[in-house]
Image: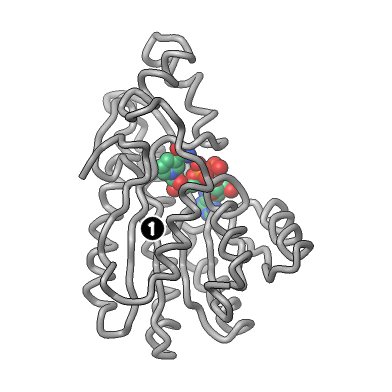
Amino acid sequence: MKLQGKTAVVTGAASGIGKAIAELLASEGATVAIADLNEDAANTVAHAIRAKGGHAIGLAMDVADETAVERAIESVAERFGGIDILVSNAGIQIVNPVHEYSFADWKRMQAIHLDGAFLTTRAALKHMYRDKRGGTIIYMGSVHSHEASPLKCAYVTAKHGLLGLARVVAKEGGEHNVRSHVICPGFVRTPLVDKQIPEQARELGISEEEVIRRVMLGGTVDGVFTTVDDVAQTALFLCAYPSNALTGQSFVVSHGWYMQ
Ligand code: NAD
């Protein structure tokens, strides 16, 4: 049990990558708050963790809503005595070429990916600093934190932005024993990606099979999707890492797509 006694908040944990991270952290002894817009799904994930003997609660949270984030993080800290780990993972995707990208969609993307990362970080840091207990903050970046693709202006911009936030948190957090990391996965088959396959096929005028083979896996060394478990294992490694030697860095988990 690598995370016994630790309390973790994982946003967007009702589905996909966040769900896998929450389950793995719980299996290593952490008490996990499954924070998601979809409260019913969050409760289902928490229930399944508890059924296996782990500790988890479901939590309604819109990461882009300042009051909702403050309230939810406070409730976790109060109930479990503090917060040791934040995984800022909630995210959506909206694809369109720049010249057709609506301002409303652009703002929604930045609100969820960047406002959400900032608001949850600020709320969690209060507890990590106040109790002098230190902590780990992980941002779910993407290969698109380093690389660009057509149709994804808002996503690429937001994912690049997370690198900046993580570096500032690493510098400010050092004296408080708080570290930050960005995990940068390649394509992972989750609802977020499944939705994009027909959308990209339509926009690019190619078949869905070509979207998978060329657009999604063309840059990998072996044509294989990254899995939710690959990403969860990376998060666990970073949460359990014993010193501040690793902080402010990004970790690309992508079958070789984009080598740093
Ligand atoms: P997913 O659609 O399976 O899960 C995303 C979760 O976030 C959902 O449960 C959704 O309800 C929740 N969510 C959405 N908006 C929210 C909000 N405002 N507040 C709280 N929760 C909200 O997606 P996923 O593929 O697991 O993506 C998770 C993260 O990983 C995202 O940040 C995404 O950008 C990133 N990522 C995904 C891939 C991939 O290929 N799937 C690759 C790189 C990075």
Q: Is residue 165 above or below residue 242?
A: above
State yes or no: Cβ of the residue under disc 1 lies below 8 Å from any atom of ligand 1.
Answer: no
Q: Secondary structure at mark 1?
A: strand
Q: Is residue 136 above or below residue 108?
A: below
Tell me how many marks there are.
1
Dot 1 surroundings within 10 Å: few (below 14), some, or many (20 or more)?
A: many
Q: Quadrant of residue 168?
A: bottom left
Q: Position of residue 259 (x, y in %)?
A: 23, 40
The residue depicted at 57 percent of the width and 45 percent of the height is 16
- Asked whether, in this view, residue 199 is left or right of residue 214, the answer is right
Q: Position of residue 23 (x, y in %)?
A: 62, 58
The residue depicted at 64 percent of the width and 82 percent of the height is 79
Under mark 1, the amino acid is: Tyr
Judging depth in this view, the residue of 179 and 96 nearest the camera is 179
Q: Position of residue 176 (x, y in %)?
A: 31, 84
The residue depicted at 43 percent of the width and 51 percent of the height is 112
Outermost bottom residue: 131
- Asked whether, in this view, residue 195 is left or right of residue 93, the answer is right
Q: Position of residue 246 (x, y in %)?
A: 28, 67
Quadrant containing the C terminus in the rendered view: top left
Q: Quadrant of residue 222?
A: top left
Judging depth in this view, the residue of 225 and 179 nearest the camera is 225
Outermost right residue: 51
Q: Which residue is mark 1?
A: 139
Judging depth in this view, the residue of 54 and 153 nearest the camera is 54
- Asked whether, in this view, residue 124 is left or right of residue 165, the answer is right
The residue depicted at 47 percent of the width and 21 percent of the height is 199
The colour style of the image is one colour
Quadrant containing the N terminus in the rendered view: bottom right
Q: Is residue 37 above or below residue 101?
A: below
Q: Is residue 205 above or below residue 42?
A: above
